[in-house]
Image: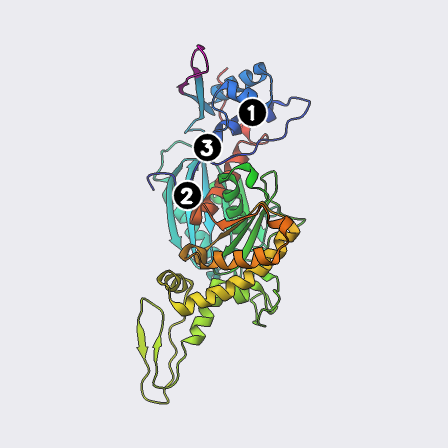
Amino acid sequence: MSASPLPQLRLSAPPLSGRIDTAVTLSTVARLVASGVAVSKADLVAAAGLARTTVSTAVDELLARGVLRPDGTRPTAGRGRPADRLALSPRGGHVLLADVGARGAHLAVADLRQQVLAHTHVDIDVKDGPDPVLREVETGLTALRAQVPGGVPVRALVIGLPGPVDGQLGIPVRPPIMPGWHAYPVEARLRTVFACPVILENDVNLRALGEARALPADQAPLLFVKVGTGIGGGLITREGTLHHGADGAAGDIGHIRVRGAPDIACVCGNVGCIEAVASANAIAQRLDTAAVARPGDTVAVGRQGDTVAVGRPGDTVAPEAMTVADVRALIARGDPTALGLVREAAALIGEVVATLVHFYNPARVTLGGSVTAASDELLAGVRSVVYQRALPLATRNLVLTNSVLGEYAGLAGAMVLGIERVLSAEEIGALGQSRK
């Protein structure tokens, strides 16, 4: 990838206290510069609320360590001399990103300036188990590292997985669509391979964080709903941070049972879960059922418009199982059967979202995933139900829309977490050595 697919993202700064801590000050200054909020000493004084001498000392220290670098000048108001611009150094460190979905993974290498230096997409299937999937991720990231400037250390790796995870222990926790992954030491394995800190996160949480940081701060609290192979949610607080809950399970909305949903068995063992009745995978299964024709019929399989002719009367036909990619293609082509199923799914998802709007009162609800990327039908259906079912106080200023980052939202969230980790008060001391 020759250019970054992502806009400049806002980074949070650690809270300041009455006691000025050097590490916190360095972290605050570095993050403000990294997010583009402040690009000169004067900007930093205003943005950080610190004394000019404190900011000047921190900037000089970060320049000496090679974390920041001069980046030209910019005009100032009046007749004052132009202010020196600051930027993160491209050699301060790299962050490795892996946004792993059920059937594919976006892999990337980024620097601390938020520049995506290399990017690829690989086909995987999480049902194959952790070893082959992580081996593919490791191979892909290693190949990407070979494409970027050498001599720059890897400072952190962030990986998102499509299931519940314990970020503290660095393991997946009984992920319904990921057999063999429970308690697998993902974080420990990747930390050993790449010799850097590793952050394990849920994939929808990464999308939620990336989306929130690409938008103005007043768009939080934010609820992100992903409709793909499964259905998941991510919650962003008013402060722009992820809400994990007590054990990291907050936002796992795929296994909410929705009123009026059919009693279809879910992979989690329950029946009627929203994921079992309204995900892209559920739509694919219903299309498969509809494709089983009567003897002598011609069956539309749904792959590029192919048909399968049924033979002699009395023969049976088992068309090849529909995939999520097939569903997306049918929706994009305006297939009436597929669109009808999307509208039914939207009504059910809308019921869940309306409940969550009452409970969490977000400023913005964002829909993402493969179904939303193919058509606006899902968005229209969810909007209709939410604005009808939710009370006016919860919806009068609510923005309900599709993702602004699309398939790259997960990479954006991973980049935010990675850079904030590298520039945190706990880690910033490892960046460079003072030449004083």
Q: Are marks 3 and 2 in contact (CB under 8 Å)?
A: no
Q: Mark 1 packing: few (<14 Cα in 10 Å), some, or many (20+)?
A: some
* Element under disc 1: helix
Seen in the picture, residue 401 relative to 219 is either above or below; the reply is below
Seen in the picture, residue 308 relative to 91 is either above or below; the reply is below
Marks 3/2: CA–CA distance: 13 Å
- Name the amino acid type tagged 1: Ala
Q: Pointer 1: what residue?
A: 47
Q: Are marks 3 and 1 in contact (CB under 8 Å)?
A: no
Residue 203 colored magenta?
no
Q: Residue at x 60, y 50 (%)?
A: 395
Q: Position of residue 277 (x, y in %)?
A: 53, 67
Q: Mark 2 packing: few (<14 Cα in 10 Å), some, or many (20+)?
A: many
In the image, 384 versus 233, the foreground residue is 384
* Element under disc 2: strand
Q: Position of residue 190 (x, y in %)?
A: 50, 46
Seen in the picture, residue 168 relative to 374 is either above or below; the reply is above
The numbered mark at residue 108 is: 2
Sequence order check: which comes first, mark 1 or mark 2? 1
Residue 76 colored magenta?
yes
* Element under disc 3: loop
Q: Is residue 109 left or right of residue 389?
A: left
Q: Nearer the viewer, mark 3 or mark 1?
A: 1
Q: How many marks?
A: 3
Q: Pointer 3: what residue?
A: 112
Q: Position of residue 187 (x, y in %)?
A: 54, 47
Q: Which residues are magenta?
A: 72-83
